[in-house]
Amino acid sequence: MGIVFLANLMPAFAPPTWTILVLFKLNWHLDPVALVITGAVAAGSGRYLLALATGRIRDRLSPHRKAGLQAAENYLTGHKGRSLLGLALFTLSPLPSAQLFEAAGLMDVPLLPVTTAFFAGRLVSYSLYIGATRIAERNLGSAFTASLTSPYGIAIQLVLILGVVMLARIDWVRILSPRDAATGHEPE
């Protein structure tokens, strides 16, 4: 599970965790329940530490950038609907999760609920992938390679990395109304 943990510490271009778990299942015929649970724990732990490490970058940002990130965080977490939508994104998103965790770390979003949602979503998705190992056995090599070399996969990774960089560069204080930025509530 160290391999899954290390892959989830990578900020970009790591193979999808499900491919690693399926590879383990096919090569070593591991117990599927234990594989799913330990895989989800290792992935969640790696992403949590990735978010913590990215959050340390926040300390090196200018006060203006920190204020902008705080405004974005207040906006996203200041309304129950937006908070639930954000947690759903971590639970169900088909997008690479590294950049989602990097953004959460930069914005100083509470990481325990985010990681819990991620863990719950991964329990479901990893169960589906491990359950379908017979199909994957025929296609695993191409899926693994495609995740690392396909132009679309590379483009998605690059766009998401750019998104994380832009998150810190956008003047969220100016974009969001002063009341929105301070409280996270909709203007009346």
Image (cartoon, grey):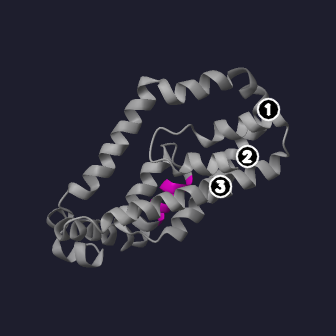
Amino acid type at image mark 2: Ser
| Side of 80 where 61 appears, left or right | left
Whole-number angstrom distance, CA of label 2 to CA of label 1: 14 Å
Instruction: Point out the tag, 2 or 3, that comes first from the N-terminus.
Output: 3
The image shows residue 29, relative to residue 66, as above or below, that is above
Q: Is residue 35 visible?
A: yes
For numbered disc 2, what is the local secondary structure? Answer: helix
What secondary structure is the magenta-colored segment mainly? helix
Instruction: Point out the tag, 3 or 1, that comes first from the N-terminus.
Output: 1
Which residue bears the numbered disc 3?
Answer: 42
Task: Give the residues drawn in magenta, as a range.
Answer: 84-91
Q: Write the residue at 60% across / 28% down.
A: 144
Crowding at dot 1, Cα within 10 Å, few <14 / some 14-19 / many 20+, comes out as some
* Residue 115 image-quadrant placement: bottom right
Mark toward the viewer: 2 or 1: 1
For numbered disc 3, what is the local secondary structure? Answer: helix
Whole-number angstrom distance, CA of label 3 to CA of label 1: 19 Å
Which residue bears the numbered disc 1?
Answer: 26
Tell whether position 22 is magenta.
no
The residue closer to the viewer here, 113 or 150, is 150
The image shows residue 133, relative to residue 98, as above or below, that is above
| Side of 60 where 136 appears, left or right | right
Tell whether position 89 is magenta.
yes
Crowding at dot 2, Cα within 10 Å, few <14 / some 14-19 / many 20+, comes out as some
The residue closer to the viewer here, 35 or 62, is 62
Given contact means CB atoms under 8 Å apart, are the residues at marks 2 and 1 in contact? no
The image shows residue 96, relative to residue 89, as above or below, that is above
Q: Write the residue at 35% across / 37% down.
A: 158
Residue 108 x, y percent position in the rendering: 38, 69
Which residue bears the numbered disc 2?
Answer: 127
Which quarter of the image is occupied by the C terminus? bottom left
